[in-house]
Image (tube, rainbow, N blue to C red):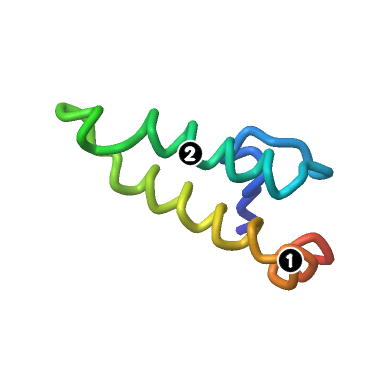
Amino acid sequence: MFIDYYSILNVEKHSSKTEIRAAYRREAFKWHPDKNVDRDTTAKMQGINEAYLILSDEEARERYDRE
């Protein structure tokens, strides 16, 4: 199954590293378990972290975009 990392972070495909970092911080702050005590946000945070790891690394992002 294909995971759309761009939609997880709510950014466009042509976004810069700065925009991706800002989107990561915004989503991580919004979905952090300390901010959402009564909701299970573990899976959501894992997706956000994975998306940031792929999209922030230029080589990994190129491979991801090709697939």
Task: Answer with the quarter of the image where residue 60 lies.
Answer: bottom right
Above or below residue 16? Residue 67 is below
Q: Residue 44, how many percent across, how many down? A: 39, 43
Horizontally, residue 25 falls left or right of residue 60, namely left
Residue at 69% across, 36% down: 11
Q: Secondary structure at mark 1?
A: helix
Residue 17: assigned label:
none
Mark 1, Cα crowd under 10 Å, few <14 / some 14-19 / many 20+, is few
Screen quadrant of the C terminus: bottom right
* Circle on res. 25: 2
Task: Please identify the residue farthest to the front as the structure is shown.
Answer: 18
Residue 37, by quadrant, is: top left
Q: Nearer the viewer, residue 52 or 41?
A: 52
Percent position of residue 25, x then y: 48, 39
> Mark 2 packing: few (<14 Cα in 10 Å), some, or many (20+)?
some
Name the residue located 70 percent from the left edge and 49 percent from the top edge.
Answer: 17
Q: Residue furthest left?
A: 38
Rendered position, 35 above or below 3 = above
Secondary element at tag 2: helix
Q: How many marks?
A: 2
Give the CA distance from mark 1 to mark 2.
Answer: 18 Å
The answer to whether residue 33 is above or below residue 65 is above
Question: What amino acid type should be assigned to the residue bearing mark 1?
Answer: Glu
Task: Give, as a three-letter code, the residue at label 2.
Answer: Arg
Residue placed under numbered mark 1 in the picture: 58
